[in-house]
Amino acid sequence: MFGQGLLKGLEITWGRLFGKKHTVNYPYKRIEMFPRFHGRFQLDVDKCIACGLCVNACPNKVIEMEREKVGKKQFLTKYVMRIEYCLFCGLCVESCNRDALRFTNVIDMNQYRRKWVRLTLVDRPAPEAEETPEEAPAKAAKAEAAAGKAPDKEG
Ligand code: SF4
Ligand code: SF4
């Protein structure tokens, strides 16, 4: 029939016009996001081993990471995400084999200033290295020698 496509199109248009609304008055009302939504990032610092796999996986060089060697392990001191360049592709999350980096379904990342958009997930100093049982006698001997050499202030 001539004009069948037009009638079909109008049917959809009128249906949407008077049907149930799917938009909400954000930010006063919110819709519940899907559990797998790619929202704000979350980093579990206890699981992170500062391996840098996520940094290398990112095609846009979004992640800035700093680490320090403490004893035999790497200690994560800084983890900043330049979210303004992020594609939310999820390659960083997929590359993390410790399940330390995750997406949440939080969508509120809007800021008034561009420089505030950056997401600082970790910014902390590295702790003092713990001495191993092998290192302890050598360290004690060194301290004793230093004390013996030190000038006696009272005498
Ligand atoms: S989601 Fe994609 S673009 Fe964003 S930090 Fe991860 S790898 Fe980079
Ligand atoms: S978040 Fe995961 S991939 Fe990235 S440095 Fe930490 S452990 Fe490695």
Image (cartoon, helix red, strand yellow):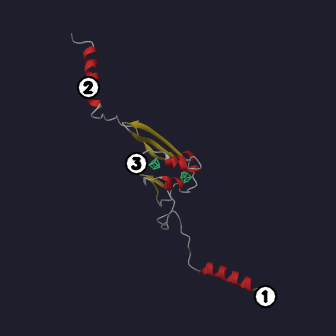
Q: What residue is at 47 percent from the left and 44 percent from the top?
A: 79
Mark yes or no: residue 67 visible: yes
Q: Earlier in the sequence, mark 3 or mark 1?
A: 1
Q: Label 2 amino acid?
A: Ala
Q: Which residue is mark 2?
A: 140
Q: Quadrant of the C terminus?
A: top left
Q: Is residue 34 above or below residue 16?
A: above
Residue 11 position (above or below residue 22): below
Upstream in sequence: badge 2 or badge 3: 3
The residue shown at (54%, 50%) is 57
Q: Position of residue 102 (x, y in %)?
A: 46, 56
| Mark number displayed over residue 2 | 1
In the rendered image, the quadrant that contains the N terminus is bottom right
Q: Residue furthest top?
A: 155
Q: Which mark is residue 45?
A: 3
* Nearer the camera: disc 2 or disc 3: 2
Query: Which SS class for mark 1?
Result: loop
Q: Residues within 10 Å of mark 2 (few under 14, many from 20)?
A: few
Query: Residue 5 appears at what percent x and percent y?
Result: 73, 83
Q: Which quadrant of the figure has residue 147? A: top left
Circle 2: element type: helix
Give how far apart the Cα atoms at labels 2 and 3 are. Answer: 33 Å
